[in-house]
Structure formats: C-alpha cells, structure tokens
Amino acid sequence: HSLGLALGVPVGLMAALGFVAVFAGATKTPIASFIMAIELFAPHSPDAMRGGFVIYAAIACFVANAVSGSSSIYRSQKHAEDE
C-alpha cells in the first residue's frame, strides 16, 4: 500500500505484484509464478495488459527469485546445481 502511494501507481497493481513476487521467491518458481500472475489478475483488468502488467509481473517474479537465496519452502525441490 505504502509503496504504491509513494510511487504514484495503483495500490492494486502493487498488491498483485507483491503477491506473485513473494510466491516466486518463497517457492523458487518464477515462471510458474509469472503464469499465475497472468491467470489471476489479467482477466479481471483488461487495462492491465495494455499498462504493462505482464512486464512488471515478470520483473517482480525474477527479481524476487534472484534475491531470495537458495532455499525453498519445498524441502524435496531439486535444484540444477545440486545434481
């Protein structure tokens, strides 16, 4: 909420991006989180597609994944560097 107000962007947009970014970082699945963002939020807001939501969602998911460390909430998840 505060970040949306500070940047002058819709609070709903920031909430949606925050939701998928947290999920992407916690699960270490940025592509799935990006697709989830499109499935959850784009159909309800046609303006979001024209406003760049897809690009912002991709950036949020991949940045969150990059800065979240190497562990995931899923203990059995395999990483490419572990094999």
Image: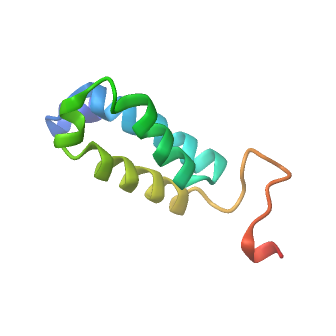
| 16 relative to 12 in the view: left or right | right
Q: Residue at x 54, y 57 (%)?
A: 65
| 75 relative to 49 in the view: left or right | right
Residue at the limit of the structure toward the left, as seen here:
8
- Picture coordinates of residue 73 (x, y %)? 74, 44
Please, is residue 64 above or below residue 2 in the view?
Answer: below
Q: Residue at x 27, y 43 (%)?
A: 53
Q: Residue at x 18, y 32 (%)?
A: 47
Please, is residue 8 above or below residue 26 in the view?
Answer: above
- Picture coordinates of residue 24 (x, y %)? 55, 47
Q: What colouring method underlies this structural image?
A: rainbow
- Picture coordinates of residue 14 (x, y %)? 31, 34
Camera-nearest residue between 53 and 10: 53
Q: Give the quadrant of residue 71.
A: bottom right
Q: Quadrant of the C terminus?
A: bottom right
Q: Quadrant of the N terminus?
A: top left
| 70 relative to 34 in the view: left or right | right
Camera-nearest residue between 70 and 54: 54
- Picture coordinates of residue 58 (x, y %)? 39, 53
- Number of marks: 0
| 43 relative to 4 in the view: left or right | right
Q: Give the quadrant of residue 70.
A: bottom right
Please, is residue 16 above or below residue 60 in the view?
Answer: above
Q: Residue at x 65, y 47 (%)?
A: 27
